[in-house]
Image (cartoon, rainbow, N blue to C red):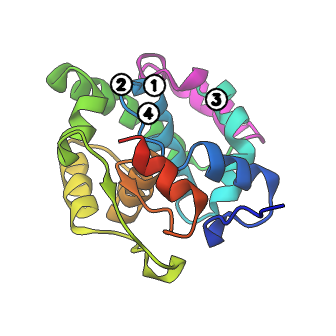
Amino acid sequence: MTTLIRCAWSGADPLYVKYHDEEWGVPLKGDDSALFERICLEGAQAGLSWITILRKRENYRAAFDGFDPAVVARYDEAKVAELLANPGIVRNRLKIASTINNAQKFLEVQREFGSFSDYLWGYVDGQPIHNHWQSLSEIPAETDLSKRISKDLLKRGFKFVGSTICYAMMQATGLVNDHTVDCFRHAEIAQMG
């Protein structure tokens, strides 16, 4: 029996392995709701481990109305109080406020570009960047491109979108293929275009 080689970060947690094997690095185009979710979750993860957020993901989806930006953009103080009392999510007032703010800014980007997907994928001319990292230690926390995206999102009024968060989002949504070359997903993701 052949053992699949995975990126070293995926570890042994079944939830992490599933995320690595099925989602991380898959080009996510044309689904603005899914892209909004990724921005929100990456921001929520700031200062925490990604597995913490993955374990709370379904709670986040329920608490934030399936990450529908049009709904989240209209949240009021009563909804904020409800979210702050929700033990299923990270109860950080700044992160909750940023999610609401980012929903409003997300809608502005959609109006300007037709979709957030078009905006984001425009940075890579619609084609993923396929890196060829040999080991986890080679993978950067940020790049010049993530700095550019971060700078533009911040200029547009987004919060919790620093260059490291933007790079994590780029990895999660497949703008970059950062699976190490020995990982079975590297070649599979490369075939996706």
Report helix, strand or loop for mark 1. helix
| Foreground disc of the pair 1, 3 | 1
At a point 30% along the width and 31% down the height, the residue shown is: 117
| Disc ID at residue 33 | 1
Q: Which residue is mark 2?
A: 30
Task: Determine if residue 184 is in view.
Answer: yes
Front position in the image: 95 or 82: 95
Q: Label 4 vs label 2: CA separation?
A: 11 Å
Q: Which residue is mark 3?
A: 61
Q: Label 1 vs label 4: CA separation?
A: 5 Å
- Circle 1 residues within 10 Å: few <14, some 14–19, many ≥20: some
Report helix, strand or loop for mark 2. loop
Disc 4 + disc 2, Cβ < 8 Å: no
The picture quadrant where one finds residue 104 is: top left
Front position in the image: 124 or 74: 124
Report helix, strand or loop for mark 4. helix
Amino acid on which the number 1 mark rests in the picture: Ser
Front position in the image: 4 or 112: 4
Disc 1 + disc 4, Cβ < 8 Å: yes
Amino acid on which the number 2 mark rests in the picture: Gly
Task: Determine if residue 97 is in view.
Answer: no
Q: Label 1 vs label 3: CA separation?
A: 11 Å
In the rendered image, residue 177, in percent from the top left (x then y), is placed at 41, 56
Q: Which residue is mark 4?
A: 36
Q: Is residue 96 above or below residue 31?
A: below
Q: Residue furthest bottom?
A: 137
